[in-house]
Image (cartoon, helix red, strand yellow):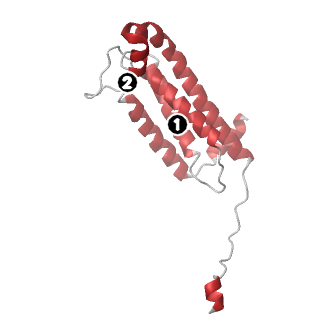
Amino acid sequence: MIPSCLTAVLLWPAKRWVTAIAVAIATFFLIGIPTAVIANPVFGRAIGVTAWSMPVLVATSVLSGMLFATYVRMDAAITDETSAKVGSVGGFLAYLAVGCPVCNKIALIALGSTGAIQYFAPVQPYLGAAGVLLLMYALRKRLVNEAQCSLPKPKKIKEQPQLDEVNR
């Protein structure tokens, strides 16, 4: 299945590559800035950035960009809502993974600050791995479907005159 995925990616037009790059950059900043993985004056962290946060952020950004680009229409439309849902869950898990455990309001309310550090922080690398794996699964599913279901270009249909024009 990997060759068909690679073949599908290699056949992408420039429009898809531009979309993939733009979405990857946007994802990088949309996740990296509020989680303070990217240092900025607006958001801060109570606990420092972990060593695995940046690789998870980069992988999430690249995979999200590529997954989003598969929805840019080429010749034949492939509608697969499951991949979009799986990809969204993957992106959300990666967001939870790279964020500060004490800055996550849901973890803080549910577990308190000590519980967030003691119970949520050790789970974050697994959330990051699960998020990246879900994004990889969704992208693979889209690319395999694209490679296997390539349809011939539709023929242009001659425009039929409207009934009002025929009756005149």
Numbered mark located on residue 119 in the image: none
State the separation of the CA atoms marked 1 and 2. 18 Å
Most extreme residue toward the left, as rendered? 41
Left or right for 54, reference 134: left
Label tally: 2
Kindly identify the residue that appears in the image at 29 percent across and 26 percent down.
Answer: 43
Q: Position of residue 80 (x, y in %)?
A: 65, 44
Q: Position of residue 83 (x, y in %)?
A: 62, 38
Q: Which residue is mark 1?
A: 64
Relative vertical location of residue 80 with respect to residue 151 in this rendering, above or below:
above
Relative vertical location of residue 11 with respect to residue 63 in this rendering, above or below:
below
Q: Nearer the viewer, residue 19 or 116?
A: 116
Location of the C terminus by quadrant is: bottom right
Q: Position of residue 21 (x, y in %)?
A: 48, 42
Numbered mark located on residue 37 in the image: 2
How many neighbours does mark 1 have within 10 angstroms: few (below 14), some (14-19), or many (20 or more)? many
Residue 138, quarter of the rendered image: top right
Most extreme residue toward the bottom, as rendered? 168
Left or right for 31, reference 9: left
